Image (cartoon, grey):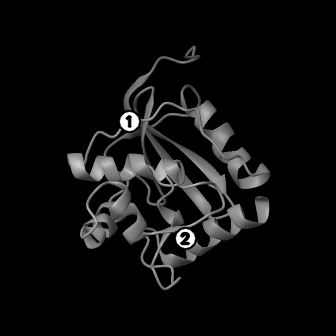
Amino acid sequence: MKKSVAACKECFDVLETPLGIVYLVFRSSVLTRITFDRPRGIVFKSGGPAAVVKKELTEYFNEGRKDFSCETSFVEGSEFERQVWNTLKEVPYGETMTYKWLADRIGRPRAFRAVGNALGKNPIPIIFPCHRIIESDGSLGGYSSGTDIKRRLIEIEYYSR
């Protein structure tokens, strides 16, 4: 993939979504974080590598895009957390699985609370869809950006299937 603008060491761009403004954080040209809170201590830089991510997220919100091709990297997190986050890609678009399912899936059936803690630290939500993980009783469970956003993401996917 060609880069149209020189990559930044660490910078962010902004995308307006149906859920509000999201901030896309990059290291070099790689997406490392999506957050609803404005990043501090790094510079704003529009264009460049953010163009692909913004296009794909806009398609997700407006057209039901199911897969992402943008380059991502976890620059934080333990080996366990990264395993949890990577396994999220196995949950199909528009479906939900439980914390217990995810714990079983990674071979740690008793670690469903640790899985929940790892999900709360997921630095790249939506693309690594932690919102698709719910409680065994069907309730939403937690979400780092609030359960209202989690509910809305699940609804967006449900109605776009």
Distance from Cα at disc 1 to Cα at disc 2: 22 Å
Tell which of 95 and 105 is nearer to you.
105
Measured as percent of width and height from the top left, residue 63 is found at 79, 50
Number of the label disc, if any, that sits on residue 24: none
Q: Is residue 151 left or right of residue 78?
A: right
Task: Give the vertical position of 4 relative to 62 (above or below).
Answer: above
The structure residue drawn at horizontal position 48% and vertical position 54%, both measured from the top left corner, is: 125
Q: Are marks 1 and 2 in contact (CB under 8 Å)?
A: no
Residue located farthest toward the top when viewing the structure as drawn: 2
Location of the C terminus (image quadrant): bottom right
Residue 95 visible in the shown view? yes
Q: What secondary structure is marked by label 1?
A: loop
Measured as percent of width and height from the top left, residue 110 is found at 24, 70
Measured as percent of width and height from the top left, residue 69 is found at 58, 32
Disc 1 residue crowd, few under 14, some 14–19, many 20+, Cα 10 Å: few
Quarter of the rendering containing residue 41 = top left
Q: Amino acid at mark 1?
A: Ser
The structure residue drawn at horizontal position 35% and vertical position 41%, both measured from the top left corner, is: 42
Location of the N terminus (image quadrant): top right
Q: Is residue 57 left or right of residue 9?
A: right
The disc, 1 or 2, on the residue closer to the chain's N-terminal end is 1
Task: Give the vertical position of 80 relative to 73 (above or below).
Answer: below
Tell which of 121 and 47 is nearer to you.
121
Disc 2 residue crowd, few under 14, some 14–19, many 20+, Cα 10 Å: many
Residue 123 visible in the shown view? no
Residue tagged by mark 2? 150
Q: Amino acid at mark 2?
A: Lys
Quarter of the rendering containing residue 136 = bottom left
Number of the label disc, if any, that sits on residue 73: 1
Tell which of 109 and 120 is nearer to you.
109
